[in-house]
Amino acid sequence: MSFSSSKNVVLDYKKGLIIGIVGKNNKAVQIIMMKYIHSFFLFLCAALVAQVSYAQDVSKPLQLGLKPAASPQMERIADFHDGLLMWVITFIVIFVTGLLIYVAIRFNKKANPTPSKTTHNVLLEVLWTAIPVLILIIIAIPSFKMLYYLDRVEEPDMTLKVTGYQWYWGYEYPDHGGISFESYMIPEDELDESKGHRRLLSTDNPVVLPIDTNIQIVITAADVLHAFTVPAFGIKKDAVTGRLNETWVRIDKPGTYYGQCSEICGVNHAYMPIEIKAVTKEEFEAWVAQSKDKLTYNYSNDARVAFAEGAF
């Protein structure tokens, strides 16, 4: 079948669908619906193409769904969303849509010229109260189990302390000789594609963490509210001044993972990304040995001044 004939088949299908809905005589509505359905088909095709290939942890235009999981936490979140929640949502949408269509057809002025004056129906009122409660209970039980799992790890192998500033992040490794440094977004005019830099995501000092390790993450802030968020790990935790919030992660595979502050924290809120390099345990130990000699990285003073003055 040629491309032109395939295209005609699709157009004929959409035209038949529209005529079946609005009838043959309503040409104006047919034209409008034809445009909307055509746009929807184009969007769906583009979204499917975008899903086929994407760089690790870097979103693409029109990409659908959650990011690929890189931790057991995110795997559970994705399973919960794509499994139970998606089935519940789909059922509710189909039921409500069907109910609306039935009501529009069965109780319009032509089909039902003399409307009923019924004001109460005990069985119906019990059902529309009990069924939503039952749905919420079905969702709540696995939700509580997952929240308990995501909360904290009892015996962490190491600790990472994260501090949010306006507008950059500070990191400390208290179990590894007190290594600490501050991490700033790389300005757009300094990006180097040969080094894999990503606009608005790459930082001058990425966090380095080992895979297959239970990592306790302690989060706070030094000025205003921030939120430490790494979607691939299933982490989103507020950073609050004067308070320590806690979460944890166990990274499954090596790679570079990105996140951003998810709490509006001022004029440069959009320019304080998180870049995490997950490496093997051997590579992490080598990085620790190398970094102990310089407990604080020599980040650019010019970058600090630029951020303070709101240049980015």
Image (cartoon, rainbow, N blue to C red):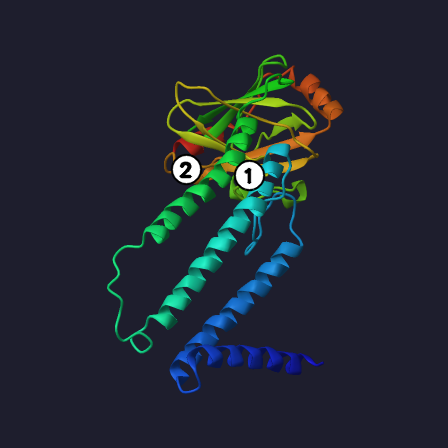
Question: In the image, what residue type sits under mark 1?
Answer: Pro
Please name the residue shown 63% across and 40% down the image: 69
Rendered image: mark on residue 268 = 2
Residue 161 screen position, x and y as percent = 53, 20
Is 286 in front, or is 65? 65
Residue 305 screen position, x and y as percent = 43, 30
Question: In the image, what residue type sits under mark 2?
Answer: Asn
Q: How many callouts does the rendering have?
A: 2
Which tag is nearer the camera, tag 2 or tag 1?
1
Please name the residue shown 62% across and 14% down the image: 175
Please name the residue shown 39% across and 82% down the image: 28
Q: How far apart are marks 2 and 1 (CA)?
A: 21 Å
In the rendered image, the quadrant that contains the N terminus is: bottom right
In the rendered image, the vertical position of residue 210 relative to residue 81, given as above or below: above
In the rendered image, the vertical position of residue 286 relative to residue 20, given as above or below: above
- Residue 104, visible in the rendered structure: yes
Mark 1 secondary-structure assignment:
helix
Packing grade of label 2 (10 A; few <14, some 14-19, many >=20) is some
Position of 206 compared to 184: left or right? right
Is 29 in front, or is 49? 29
Residue 251 screen position, x and y as percent = 65, 31
Sooner in the amino-acid sequence: mark 2 or mark 1: 1
In the rendered image, the vertical position of residue 205 relative to residue 158, given as above or below: below
In the rendered image, the quadrant that contains the C terminus is: top left
Residue, far bottom:
25
Q: To which residue does mark 1 refer?
A: 231
Residue, far right:
282
- Residue 273, visible in the rendered structure: no
Mark 2 secondary-structure assignment:
loop
Residue, far top:
177
